[in-house]
Image (cartoon, rainbow, N blue to C red):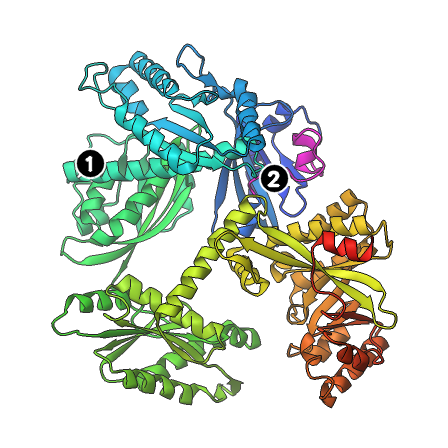
Amino acid sequence: MKSEKDMSSEFHSVVLNQLDTGVFITEADTDRIVYMNETMKQRFQLVDPEGKPCYKVLQKDMNERCAFCNRRELLTNRQMKDCVWNEVNTINHRLYKNYDQLFEWQGKQYFIENSIDITDLMSISETNSAAFNLNANDGSFMQLIRLGKNENKSVTVVMCDINDMKLINEQYGWSAGDRLLSAFADYFRRQLHEQELFFSLKSDQFMAVFYGENYQSAEKRVQQIQKTMAFDKDNGQLPYEFTFSFGLYEVYPSDHYSAEDIIARADERLYQQQRAYHIMKSKNQYLKHAGATTAVDFEYDKEHLYEALAASSDDYLFVGNMKTGVFRYPETMVQEFGLPGQIVENAAAFWSELIYPEDIEDFLASNQEIADGRAESHNIEYRAKNVRGEWIWLRCRGNMIRDEQGSPNLFAGIISNLGKQRQIDPMTGLDNKFAFEDLVKKSLMNKDQVKQLGIMVLNIDSFKNINDLYNRSFGDEILRLTASKLNSLLPEQAKLYRLDGDEFGVVLFNPRLNEVLSFYQQIQTVFNRQQEYDGRKYYCTLSAGYALYPQDAENYQNLLKYANYSLEHSKHIGKNRLTLFSSDILKQKERKLELMEMLRESVDRGFVGFSVAYQPQVNSKDQKLHGAEALARWSCPKYGNISPVEFIPLLEQSGLIVQFGNWIAYQAAQQCKKWCAYQPDFKVSINLSYRQLIEGDILPFMKETLKKLKLSPDNVIMELTETYLAQEDGSIQEAISELKRIGIQLAMDDFGTGYSSLFSLKNMPVNVVKIDRGFVKEITTDMFNATFIRTITQLCHEVGKTVCLEGVESAEEYNVVKYSGIELIQGYYFGKPMSAADFEEKYFK
């Protein structure tokens, strides 16, 4: 007799094999297939695909991960729950919409993909519109893109979608809808210039290609078309009004995107405008029909009801029919919020009437994502007014089920009543960030009594060290103790709040500057010494940022933002200090945010503006060339050359460092391969980011790079800072071991700057130790630095490690260190970082 587990497994297998869509699961790190349903196997005539990389069996002539694959974003952007993307398959040339999710099982990450064939849905015959079908004419599209490259002109892609097409078909008939499509396409095509193109994509969506037009001029053209399009109900050509949404994407001559990639980017811009249109439409419906009615009947997809509800819990259970807009709520919710009944039509409009005004936009936006099918689930908190006139915090968590055609069908989940406890932090007993926000906003409205109001944001420095040293329970106790101590130090006209994590907020009413400074000095006095709790010692200081109303800002959002900017500045310049907000801090922050956006654009456009410089490394005895360190350089149009000290941390913060690090590694390896023709034992040193080790695919990437370039791993050295090498992180140590296993050498960079140098020296499996340039400064007069270099060099030699000294800038410094036993030297005395062309000219020509 089969067990329930066996029956469940068999049930899922039967269901998956009967689906019309393809389903397969792959390992996230290797792309190896571990499961594929029968539909997918039959689609590509596969017998035993399990164990093989997906790109080998599902694509034509692919030997590495597909360049157009979008699901890797799920690994780099942890906030993404899933990704949806279109793909033209390279084997059968059919168009698929892929739905990907990342999940973890038994400590390993996997991708699951649901692939739907939408080729037929995306095709419209030319009898229905005056537009060509893109599936048959994408060659002309890419030909125009290539022409733009050759003539150094931008090409702007315009995605258009007729709004409310479904409603027009239902009210006026399909023939009326066809006439509208034809009239729209005909009119739009007549506005095109020579060489420009117009395609149909699906029933109510079209794409125009403007040649030699940048984003701004293309936007003006489309807006003019919107204004002058002469077929609305007023002139009698059509019995109804209609509008269309559009999205633009400018393709620069330097871009290297596929047709699918360009269309996807324009489609994303279109979606943003469609979303704004539907949100505005919902708001207008609410204003027009401010209320809700009780439906006579309620229909829903009972087959999937349990699937949605089982993913939730108790409290207010709800279920909704996405096709009719009818929702059902429990009687307890009817009584609490005065619903017209358990079954409610136009539920979004009814809830909009109850929701706190500042929460309406987020509420409508989240629900619109579900209605559009862009999200499978949502989790949102908002305030609603109950029958007693009280504002109650609610948390809505729901899951959406699609029908056989992939359209939103059923939406079900729970609404949790958070009540008044929403204002209290349970750990510290302090009022929380929502109460903090309420107080500040109310105080700013009371201008007669509140002439000035200060916000101080406090953050515990290096709180993670306390959790790591002991445990999270101990860390929670420290948070409680910290809250208690801060409370005891408050000035009379001030109140303390727990914000997020290890962060606290203080509101000071009509404060004097000396009072603010005195308050923080007291905090430093209390926390600047080692403390003890439950027999265990710990040390923690607090950094702070401060902003003042009305001098710095006149509303809550900007006050909090500027206080946080100031806190960030305190952290950046050394922690354990208070920073008062100033215009200089705002300028620095704005520059940082601007640079981050420009970095994203540079990476997105194929690393435009980035380059690699090479600094020579020489043998200390004879000064002969040994190799070079690859160093990243970046120049942007607005600010020119930006120091790596500034842009590398921004790449880390933005999550771009993995992608960027792989690009640098490939460029350096490619250059090394070329120079090995002149010097076979030439070595290139490549800096490796901590995030590349824990989040990236550095091992398979380097394997594939070495294989593709036919470069020996002996010619490559990967550099990691001492701080990260010393961490007892299993994933880091595993990645390091795997890199060594394939023959790549490892170097410990900036040795001597960390807190665990000798431990690192003894235990880390590195081949090269690079002594930090700080020990070269004043080496001609400072006996300690010279002795340190000799001692460390001797220790390294005893454990079989090579030593490289960084920062040698003069003949005097070289004469001091050349007899210390070090093997390699790197510094301005032997060569500054230079371009590959200059390096080659100097050393190999």
Amino acid carrying mark 1 in the image: Gln
Describe the element under mark 1 as helix, strand or loop.
helix
Q: Which percent across, then down, holds residue 638?
A: 48, 54
What is the distance, in whole Å, between disc 2 and disc 1 at their CAs? 43 Å
Q: Which residue is mark 1?
A: 285
* Left or right placement of residue 363 versus residue 632 in this view: left
Amino acid carrying mark 2 in the image: Ile
Q: Which percent across, then down, holds residue 480?
A: 39, 78
Q: Nearer the viewer, residue 571 or 439?
A: 571
User: How many other residues sit within 10 Å of disc 2, few (<14), some (14-19) or many (≥20)?
Assistant: many
* Left or right placement of residue 565 versus residue 831 in this view: left
Q: Residue at x 49, y 57 (%)?
A: 639
- As displayed, is residue 838 above or below residue 782? above
Can you tell which mark lies on residue 25? 2
Is residue 459 at all visible to an observer of this figure? yes
Q: Nearer the viewer, residue 67 or 431?
A: 67
Report the mark closest to the observer, 2 or 1. Answer: 1
Q: Earlier in the sequence, mark 2 or mark 1?
A: 2
Quadrant into which the N terminus falls: top right
* Left or right placement of residue 467 versus residue 781 in this view: left
Q: Which percent across, then down, holds residue 707?
A: 78, 45
Q: Which percent across, then down, holds residue 208?
A: 43, 25
Q: Which residues are magenta?
A: 50-71
The outermost residue toward the left is 448
Which of the 4 image quadrants contains residue 173? Answer: top left
Q: Residue at x 49, y 87 (%)?
A: 532
Which of the 4 image quadrants contains residue 555? Answer: bottom left
